[in-house]
């Protein structure tokens, strides 16, 4: 787990700008969804093509927060990445052509194709039968065509999304930005997210809290579930 936090200069700037540090004193569990992003073998398993080692260290926090939010009546949504790869091409060709190095492209495509080992939730995660599982094929699960996440959230009357998972600065942050633009209230859970470095993790937290929502720890989320 990352042992770093938002800088004092950012905190001071927030207080001057909006008169408070945190946006939300209360989270109504009935209209709140806990969305856990990409906590799957492709990112959590040692030696996986896209391994984020710190992701294994946030599993306990995610499980405990999911348990408390589930008990409070919130929706629990697990989002995993999978890419349909046929004939040497994928449904996100721009990613595999330009972002993934040639020497690992074939391995990554095979590992993250639908039903492959890389798309399975990490075995230490506590997913319940009533939880929702959604598959996406872009960084951002809310971009049009990437997944059914928006439809699920809207159909269930969700107003607030509490975001966890990996990477903090990629899939979690891109979802937070878009969710805010779509008029959802946004909370990024600092100790339920993981990046490849402390620097990248903190940068995402500071971006979100300044412009797109709130950043809370798991215990702070629990305190606000009333």
Image (tube, grey):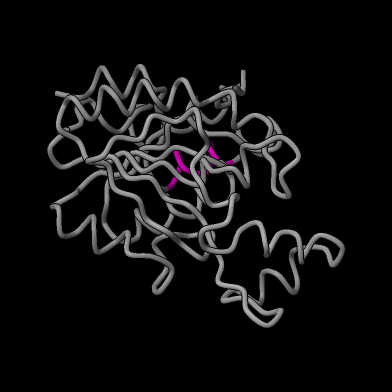
The quadrant in which the N terminus is found is top right
Is residue 222 found left or right of 171 in the rendered image? left
Q: Residue at x 46, y 45 (%)?
A: 37
Q: Where on the picture, by quarter, is residue 76?
A: top left
Q: Find residue 55 and report its horizontal and vertical position in percent.
A: 59, 32
Q: Splitting the image into 4 quarters, where does residue 66 fall? A: top left
On-image quarter of the C terminus: top left
- Name the one closer to the observer, 168 or 87: 87
Residue lying at the far right of the rendered structure: 103
| The stretch drawn in magenta includes residue 209 | yes
Residue at image position (36%, 16%) is: 219
Q: Position of residue 94 (x, y in %)?
A: 66, 76
Count of number-bearing discs = 0
Q: Is residue 157 magenta?
A: no
Hey, which residue is sitting farthest bottom in the picture? 87
Q: Residue at x 59, y 45 (%)?
A: 169
Q: Main secondary structure of the magenta part?
A: helix
The vertical placement of 203 against 174, above or below, is: above
The answer to whether residue 180 is left or right of residue 202 is left
Of residue 4 and residue 40, the one placed in the foreground of this image is 40
Q: Which residue is drawn at the image coordinates 87% and 62% (left, top)?
A: 103
The image shows residue 23 at horizontal and vertical percentages of: 30, 33
Is 72 left, or right, of 89 in this rendering? left
Q: Which residues are magenta?
A: 204-211
């Amino acid at each position: 787990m990352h042992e770093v936090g938002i800088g004092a200069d950012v905190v001071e700037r927030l207080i001057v700008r909006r008169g408070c540090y945190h946006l939300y004193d209360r989270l109504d569990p009935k209209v709140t969804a806990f969305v856990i992003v990409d906590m799957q073998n492709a990112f959590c398993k040692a030696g996986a093509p896209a391994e984020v080692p710190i992701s294994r260290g946030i599993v306990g926090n995610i499980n405990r927060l999911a348990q408390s939010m589930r008990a409070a009546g919130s929706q629990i949504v697990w989002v995993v990445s999978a890419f349909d790869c046929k004939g040497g091409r994928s449904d996100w060709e721009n990613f595999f052509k330009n972002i993934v190095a040639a020497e690992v492209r074939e391995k990554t495509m095979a590992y993250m194709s639908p039903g492959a080992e890389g798309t399975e939730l990490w075995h230490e995660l506590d997913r319940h039968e009533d939880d929702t599982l959604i598959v996406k094929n872009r960084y951002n699960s809310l971009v049009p065509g990437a997944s059914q996440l928006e439809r699920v959230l809207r159909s269930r009357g969700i107003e607030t999304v509490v975001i966890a998972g990996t990477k903090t600065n990629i899939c979690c942050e891109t979802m937070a930005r878009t969710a805010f633009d779509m008029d959802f209230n946004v909370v990024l859970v600092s100790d339920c997210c993981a990046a490849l470095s402390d620097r990248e993790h903190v940068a995402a937290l500071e971006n979100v809290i300044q412009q797109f929502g709130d950043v809370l720890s798991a215990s702070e989320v629990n305190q606000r579930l009333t």
